[in-house]
Structure formats: C-alpha cells, structure tokens
Amino acid sequence: MAEDKIKLAVYKFSSCDGCQLSLLNLEDELLDLVGAVEIAYFLEARRQVLDPPYDVGLVEGSVSTPEEAERIIQVRKDCKTLISIGACATSGGIQALRNWADAELYKQTVYAHPEYIDSLDTATPIGAHVFVDYELRGCPVNQYQLLELISALLTGRRPNIPTHSLCVDCKRRGYACVAVSKKQPCLGPITQAGCNALCPKFSRACYGCFGPMEQPNIHSLGKMFAEKQDCKPHQMKHLLRSYNGYLEPFKQASEYYEQIEQE
Amino acid sequence: MTKITIDHNTKAILDKKDFARLIKILQEQGYTVIGPHIVDDVVSLRPIDSVKDLPIGYEDEQEKGEYSVKKVDCQSYFQYVVGQDNPRRYFMPPSQRLMSFHVDKKQFVIDQGPPQAPKLAFLGLRACDLASIQIQDRVVGYGVESTFRCESDTYYGETRRQSILIAVNCTRPGNTCFCSSMNTGPKAKENFDIALTELRQSFIVEVGSEKGKKLAQKLPLKEASESDLELAELKLQNAAKHMGRQMETEQVRKLLNNTIEDSHWDKVADKCLSCGNCTMVCPTCFCCTVTDSTDITGTKISRTKEWESCFTHQFSYASGGPQRNTIKGRYRQWMRHKLCTWWDQFGSSGCVGCGRCITWCPVGIDITEEVETLRQSNKSLLNSNNLQEVTT
C-alpha cells in the first residue's frame, strides 16, 4: 500500500515558516494527511528524507539568495507537480520591499559583518524562476485551503479556491463593513478572499494578505480613500506594499502612487 | 385578554410598555425571533432575546458609501431603516451544507441530509423587505406556481411557510431610500402577518393574515382612536414625501434595452470595484453556487451551497473563461437584470428601492443616479418610435 501513496515534499526558501506550520497546525486532519500521502521531504516535520522524484512539492518562501536561485531549479526537476504556498512564494513576500530599495545599503547599515551576507538584490516569487503548477496565496496560507488543494490533487478534481473579493466572504459571514461603517481604508474590495475575513471580523480593515483579487480596480478604491479618508499617495503606496506589494497589479499601482507622491 | 374584536385589517393600539409581551408570545410559540440589533455599529437582522436587544433610541444616517448610527435622546424603537442584512440571510442562508456522505465499501452512506427549516419570527421588516420576499417567492416558486422559473427550494419554502412576518412601516426614511419610486413602501401593503406603525407611546397594529390575527388576539390591544389613525397616516404620507432618493421608472426598460452600447457604462466601470457588495446586500439577489468537496482520504464528500455574485469571474465561467470578462459587462448585466430583464424573467422589477446597494457600495455607485444619467443623455432616443420595443 505504502508504495501507492503519493510522495509529498515540503521546501522552505526565504520565509518565516508560518505556511509550513499551517500544515502541521491541521491537527485533526494531520493523521488523515499522513495516511494519504508519504511525507518524503519535510525537514520541519520528519528527519528521514526519501529520494526524489516526488509527486507533489510545496514551496514556501521567496528566492532571495544565489543559493536559493540554484536550488529552486533542482526542486522543480525533483517534483512532478510544484505548488508555491504563501505570500513569499507567490509574490516575494514582505522581503520583496527591498526590490524598491538599495539592498547593499541595508546590508551595510544593519549587519556588523556585512561580508557574511550573501543575498540577491531582489526577493522574487518562485514563479519568477521556474514554472509552478498552482499558487496558493495568503500570509500565512489558509490551512484549510491547503488541505483542499492537496485533497483535490489526490482526487483529481479542480480545487475550490475562490479568487473573488474579500467583501463576498465578509457579507456571507455578516460582518459589518469597516470601509462603509467605520471609514477605514479597507483593502477588502481589491483583495482575494481566503482568510475567512479575519480582520473585518474584529472591525479592522483588511490589509491585503491574500494579494490582489481577480481584476481589482485599485485606482477607484484609491480615489475613494483619497476623497473620503484623506488618504495621501504615499499612504496608498504603503497600503499596497505590504505582504504582496511585489505582485501585479499591486506592484504597478504602488509605483503609480510613488510617482504622483514625488510630483 | 383581548378587549376588542380582532379581524383581518383590524387596526388597534399596542402600548410600548406591552411590546415586550409580543416577543415573549413569539418565543413561547417556539419562534426564534429575528429583529434589528446593532452589531459593530450597524443595525443588522439577528436573533434577539428580548426588547432590550432592539436599537431603541438609535437613528441611522446613510449616504452613498457611508453608514453610521447614533443614539438620540428618545424612546423610539424603529427610527432607523434597513442595514446591510436582509431577510434572505434566513430564507437562503449565505452558506449551507446541503448534505454529506461517505463511501463505505462500494456504497454511499448519508451522514447528514438537508438542513431542517427553522421556525422564525421576523420583527421589524420594512415594506421594501416584504416586497423583496414576494420577489424571492416568485424566483423559487413558493406559493406562486404560475411564475415558477427556478428550481423549487424546499428549505426556502419550509422556512417561509413556518415564518411569521411582523413589519414596521417606515416613518423616517433613509437618505438612500427610494421605495416610493418603486411602489413598494414606505407603508407595508401586503405580504405581512402584522404591520406596526410607531407613535410616541404606542404602535398601531394592523392585522394582515390569519396567522397575524391569531397572534394579535393574544396581545393586550386597545381600540385605536381616529386621531391615532390619522396621525399614523400623516406620518406615512410625510415619509413618502421625504425619500432620500427617487428613480424615474417610466420607460426604464425601454431605456436600458436601447442603451447597451452607451459610453456611460464605461464611466461606471471606471468606478465599479466589482467587489460584489451590492449583490450581497441586495434583498432580491438570489444567486448561489453549489460546491462538492472531498476530504483528504477521498471517502468523505460534502455539498455546500453559498451565496454567489454575478460580479465574480467564477459566476459566468464557462469553457474558455468568464463570459463577462469586463467590469463594465458585469455591472451592466446586474443593473439591467434588476430593472429590465427581471420583468422578462419574473414579471416584475427586481429592485425594491431599499437603497442598500447605494449605501454599501464602498465607492458609492448610485443606481438611481446611473439611470438618471442614461435617461438625460438619451432623451431624444426615448421620444423616438424607432426603438427596440419591450418584448413582454
């Protein structure tokens, strides 16, 4: 039976481990998961490493070092299906903020011995380096979406992962709209659902952990923030440049606000 | 207990001090009472336990894309209008597990069947809400076989049959309300069991059905005086005159049928976020998606029904991609459906004038303004006879 099981690999690149942890946090479903798949490579969970090839590879983190840029090529070769999970792997993550800055200057300022630091000037998503079969958004990913994706792969069906706005989820759950009733700069109307509307549930504006939704109208939302909430271009830029700032079309929009900020 | 004879269309007085009794009786009869209740500074429709849960003394302020409530110095019970919730939350729940089953050897075994319909008492529904329920009845074919268009919905039908509708006539319309234009309010005309009109110390109780009559007979009602009735009537007339919005409905179908390529749709699309908020708060939107899901072992399967919005890609996804791939196409489809093609489909307008879509649109797109802009720029078209006529 064991040889029939699909072999799962979980890789870490530049990241906080939060997405891998959401897999381990499944608790109730974890035994079912290890019953259904063979954990072939998952350093955070199992010391034993099986030889590649693997059927499914989950990649957490962004490519931020020369070593990672090489390693991801091998990872792609080792996995039949490759899935990038979480904001870092799908957009570059919060570390991608350095893509707009002088990384060398940071290195010199922050580290006592900058000569030990061997990093690239940019942090980029996995998809910028190799072909990925699926991308799962979120900072961190929603553990149930992750489970859904793996279940769908095992069954050979299409995963049920919505790409619509967060607002749809908020309204289904009956949470009061923070944009309309509290005049907060909520990114919900341009952000993909998936977090179970965690922030609006606690009356806090969405800050876009799941990245841009399908066809977001960022310009219109920005105009409303400017008119009703006196949101300045640099504030709009910062709103867009957080966990998924380097992901289009957040990237392009943030560059637009940066440009008008300077004018 | 009753001192006066209660019959259909009876109008009587219920003192405010006896209002708690109404909720108590409903609870004793096994109803879960759904009424206005403030959740995170928004008047919502939620289960309530007692009269204390009502937003007594609160007023709301609504504008396009803006909503707020404030406590005012009075003891009024219903001086606010509708919030972001609407009754379909209870008749067609936003997310519902339809069934779940597992595979045992080579057989399917049902673990959980269709959900049981609850017994609900709606307290404080407005005339627009009642009109929306009538529209939904036609959509799912409840009690109106002749206009049956969609798959009949057992859960809806059962919940509807078991529920009791207690309406409140609006004496203080909101700033985004336009029910008088859509001929649905501010006074509840039909489809209620009991309708209340709030006065200073009391309510005028109007009986609208057999179910309402039975409930009214249990209430400590008093004879309504001529002056009470006159005052209530004046308040409602006044409310009808003070709608925050209005929509000219004359020839609106003709207008929307002949302006499909109007450049104004591009302007609306520049603004529209396609976030779906308008469809989620609209009391007549009924679209749902049904999803089947398997667990990690592939042996447990569940089927879930959820609210869906025509503003999502998924909604019109067919071979090759979404059929309405632009925001312009999606907004135009939604608005034309509400005001125009709804007539062809269900024999009525799909808009009840509650104004929710105006208030809860984050960028404040106003359906009444959009109709007016189209009308103004197509005046000559409307007057000409060389137009595509309405088919039905």
Image: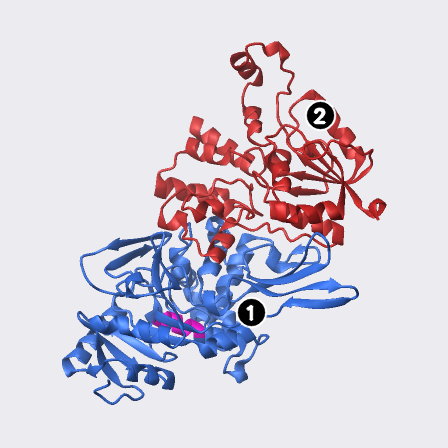
Structural distance between the alpha carbons of marks 1 and 2:
52 Å
Q: Which mark is residue A124?
A: none
**Label 1 packing within 10 angstroms: few (<14), some (14-19), many (20+):** few
**Residue B216's spot in the image, x, y percent?**
30, 82
**Chain of residue at mark 1:** B
Left/right of residue B247 with respect to residue A150 in the rendered view? left
Left/right of residue A23 with respect to residue B345 in the rendered view? right
| Chain seen in red | A
Asked whether B284 or B78 is in front, the reply is: B78
Q: Which residue is mark 1?
A: B115
| Span of residues in magenta | B126-133
**Label 2 packing within 10 angstroms: few (<14), some (14-19), many (20+):** some
| Chain seen in blue | B
User: Is the N terminus of chain B in the top left, top right, bottom left or bottom right quadrant?
Assistant: bottom left
- Determine whether B14 is above or below A37 in the image: below
Q: Secondary structure at mark 1?
A: loop
**Residue B314's spot in the image, x, y percent?**
61, 56
Overall secondary structure of the magenta section: helix
